[in-house]
Amino acid sequence: MNEPKPLAVITGASSGIGAVFARMLAARGYDLGLVARREDRLRQVADELGSRFHTQCTVLKADLTLASDLLAVEDFVAAAANLRLLVNNAGFGTLERFSEATVDSQDAMHRVHVMATMRLTHAALRNFGAAKEGAIINVSSVAAFVPRPGRTSYYATKAWINCFTEGLYLELKNAGSLVRVQALCPGFTITEFHDALGINRDFISQGWWMPAETVVKASLEGLGKAKLFVVPGWRYKLVVSLVRMLPRGVLHAALTKGPASLRG
Ligand SMILES: NC(=O)c1ccc[n+]([C@@H]2O[C@H](COP(=O)([O-])OP(=O)(O)OC[C@H]3O[C@@H](n4cnc5c(N)ncnc54)[C@H](OP(=O)(O)O)[C@@H]3O)[C@@H](O)[C@H]2O)c1
């Protein structure tokens, strides 16, 4: 009998970076678990990959802000016999200041970025178990490296993803585990993310925008090299290294007295 293909579960696979992960992983011989709320879009991805690569796709319609939906995905991740990769990618932005936003919108963001990432990571590690092999990619952002007034929860939840992934990386290393973990930190990427916020992409020059394919390619190359943090694109690598060197006081001055767009 043929060996089953390795399985990758991808959250937020109905568009953008998640859909590109699905396409690139299918091309590399993975079967897929596709998670998001828009079932029709997941089925389109599944049909396309079924005919192009004979990929077996399990469509998991789930709203990750709902505990019951998250639990169903967790059960799938924990039990799938051929699970080799989990991509925690689902996410969204909001535009209001924290103090002016509804608490429910901020709560929803924490559920998707933090709670779903934490619970699905735990389920995947239980699955990898004694074999201690497998990989987890947590999609963060360059936003993780700074605070940002006006986008407080987005930047804070992405900082949590980086800190969580780094802690786990060290924990797994100490335990002699072969499981690889990565925090993928893209900058501006051409997806539906900004469309959903009603933001025109002209607000920043073209050179800063990356195709989602560039981001996913960098992530998968980074995974091959067991890189913990992957920041795609030279511009963003430069920005991140400069920001990391900046004294907090200078950063705070820029974020309080700087351009209105940064002050939020
Ligand atoms: N685009 C950028 O510039 C950029 C930069 C840095 C980091 N990122 C990160 O990249 C990740 C993917 O975003 P993207 O740029 O590819 O944007 P996107 O095209 O809008 O994709 C977001 C995905 O997340 C899913 N999602 C959102 N809320 C969900 C929920 N409650 N339950 C389940 N799924 C949910 C969406 O699916 P449904 O709507 O069908 O549920 C969609 O598949 C996010 O974590 C984002 O923070 C993006």
Image (tube, rainbow, N blue to C red):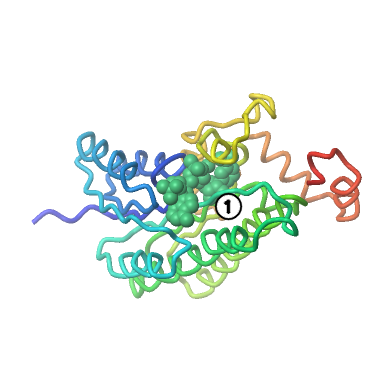
Residue 83 coordinates in the image, percent (x, y): 31, 61
Q: Quadrant of residue 33?
A: bottom left
Q: Residue at x 36, y 73 (%)?
A: 129
Residue 242 coordinates in the image, percent (x, y): 78, 44
Residue 47 coordinates in the image, percent (x, y): 23, 39
Residue 64 coordinates in the image, percent (x, y): 45, 60
Q: Residue at x 74, y 45 (%)?
A: 241
The answer to whether 264 is drawn above or below residue 163 in the figure is above
Judged left or right of residue 206, residue 118 is: left
- Can residue 12 be seen by looking at this rendering? no
- Three-letter amino acid code of the residue under disc 1: Ser
- Can residue 112 be seen by looking at this rendering? yes
Dot 1 falls on a residue whose secondary structure is loop
Note whether ligand 1 is within 8 Å of mark 1: yes
The answer to whether 47 is drawn above or below residue 164 in the figure is above
Q: Which residue is mark 1?
A: 140
Q: Residue at x 50, y 68 (%)?
A: 118
The answer to whether 13 is drawn above or below residue 65 in the figure is above
Judged from this view, the residue extending furthest toward the left is 1
Quadrant for the N terminus, please: bottom left
